[in-house]
Amino acid sequence: MSVGLTKWARLRIILVGLGLACFGLVLLGRFIHLQIICGSELREELDREVRKHCPVLPVRGLILDRRGVELAISTEAYSLVAHPQQIKNADLISRELAPLLGLSFLELNETLTRARPFVFVKRHLTPAKEEAFRNWKDQTEDRARAARRQGERADEDAIYLIPEAQRYYPQQCLAGPILGFCDIDGNGLEGLEYVYNNELYGQPKKCVNMLDARGHIVVSGEKAWDPDVMGNNLVLTIDRTIQYIAEKELQKGVENWKATGGLVLVTIPRTGEILAMAQEPRLDPNLPTQYPKEARQNRVITDALEPGSSFKVFIVAAALDAGVVKPRDQFNCENGVWRLSAKEVIHDVHPYGGLTVQQVIQKSSNIGAAKISHKLGPKRLDLYLRDFGFGKKAGIHFPGETSGLLKNHQRARSLIDRTTTAFGQGVSVSVLQLCMALEAIGNGGVLMEPILVKEIVSPRGDKVKEFNPRPVRRVISEETAAQMLNIMQTVTQEGGTASQASPPGFTTAGKTGTAQKVVGRAYSHSKYNSVFMGLIPAQDPVLAITVIVEEPKGAIYGGVVAAPIFREIAGQAMGVLGYYPQPDKSDSILAKDQPVMPAPPAPPVPEAVPLKASLFGPPDLQDLVVRPELASGPLKVMPDLRGMTIRRAVKLLHRSGVRCHLHGSGLAVAQEPPPGYPLEPGVVCVVKFEPHN
């Protein structure tokens, strides 16, 4: 009995063992099938369902001014993304979301049905659209929960928000053309954003998000402002306050003269650092597509303009340095008309006889400058002008820099071609070139390389690269530079062409210019650029400033239009830098030794008085009475000139931007147009003078 039980027990044990063995073999086979035979496919499917790779775009570095003020930053914005392959009813989602996102049904539906694992639906949502999407998501949760089966994913789970960095310019229009702007992916397209894109952009990467069975993110690999993707920061030489001053005063000047535009550059002569770079019209880099192409370019660097009479400074500096002239040498200015040949004639705005080299600059004589350039000779003229930096790029690290145009005077076809350069015709320069050449005079004759970016700093504050001041070459001697400062100071004193240029309490060494614009293939007689460039203070300059006003209306001369803008910018900028007005003192020995007959104070505008004599008829005795003093500033109507000396009448008309033709000598007895006549661009005043017995 016990033996039989033992046999049955043994059989049961064997059967159970065989069953367990078979079950184990089945499990082993299933394991091998899942892990080895189908393992790679299943793992890929698992990754597709649970692990989602999402791009993490770089966060662009900051752009700061020299004092650390933020000019360009990156802010957090949300973009809407989707996994089209997980969406079953794209039509329903498109109908509901399209009006919330401001998209058409067809556009959104096409995006949600693409054969891609991941797509951007809409980038950088506004706060209102972001909130609308979140509300839609909340409202559809209940509907989705009731409709789906256990473990089934809802379509709305496959569309969600991710954070991104969006470029923003908190100062709006301030320094817009300098900064440039970016595309929606954060790639620089213009300005410093473009030039330093590699340094600012950072390194993109991907993060992995872990999802649950419904597709909700359980574990996110994203980090807020991940240091691994942040770019370096740029520290500029620009001073935000001085940039604001330059833009504000330029805008006021352009509006006052109803000009088409304007350009300003403010630099430090000793280092070549750029403190401000302004232009009109301006650009808001937050809205670049709303501005024309010319507003998106930094025209201080990209545009080449004729400098007009401001170029005489460099002709005279070259001649003084070469030793071919001295400040007191006199030149016959031919009473305003110099005939080089039967068809080649050079004119001065006002007739002059003999002028010293100093007076040629002070009075801005074209004939005097031309004769000085002839003494210098074409070979030395070319050498000095190219040493000043004209005809080649200044070397600033910025896109679109122009090299300007400087002819080869040794190969010029005619004498007039070699001569017009002396007063800034037939040559084109950028505002940057003009200001850097001016800097050389203010820096003891040494030309500096322009600096716009001071340093590059890592996100952790480490200095990556520093840009130090770099002298390019010595152009003129220190003695010549000092002589030029003294000569240029007389331009801003009484009797000069820019007596309105100096801020109260400061001395200024400057030069005016009035450049005819080229229209087609000829010079326009109605379109001009008004130029003033200056160094302040006149001795040991702290700032070099160049101002150009394009196509002003009502007046054209640089001393009338551009010099007051210079005065306002210079005075305020010196205060920002910690320099304050000093008691009025004459620093220029040359100005004392070589006085030019000082003009009387500017007279106030009188009421219109009927002219009692025809233009060339006999004057009435009471017409010879001296008029009251005229207020400073440009005039709106023709003043009464009768009874004024030639010098006084010319000064008044010049201040108002009016061209004049003078007949006779003595005191003014008749004029055309008459007093009270509205002043318009291109008005020419004819004045008759007779000796007063």
Image (cartoon, rainbow, N blue to C red):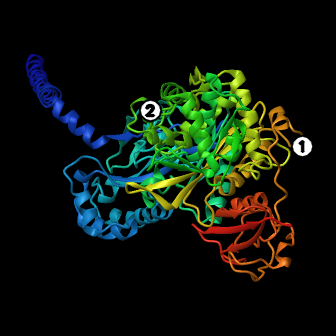
Packing grade of label 2 (10 A; few <14, some 14-19, many >=20) is some
Name the residue located 60 percent from the left edge and 26 percent from the top edge: 447
Residue 584: which numbered mark, if any?
A: 1
Residue 409: which numbered mark, if any?
A: 2
Name the residue located 58 percent from the left edge and 62 percent from the top edge: 552
Residue 249 x %, y %: 68, 55
Residue 119 x %, y %: 29, 50
Q: Which of marks 1 and 2 is nearer the N terminus?
A: 2
In the image, what residue type sits under mark 1? Asp
Against 560, is 533 above or below?
Answer: above
Packing grade of label 1 (10 A; few <14, some 14-19, many >=20) is few
Residue 304 x %, y %: 47, 44
Name the residue located 54 percent from the left edge and 60 percent from the top edge: 551
- Element type where label 1 sits in the image: loop
In the image, what residue type sits under mark 2? His
Between 146 and 660, the one nearer to me in the picture: 660
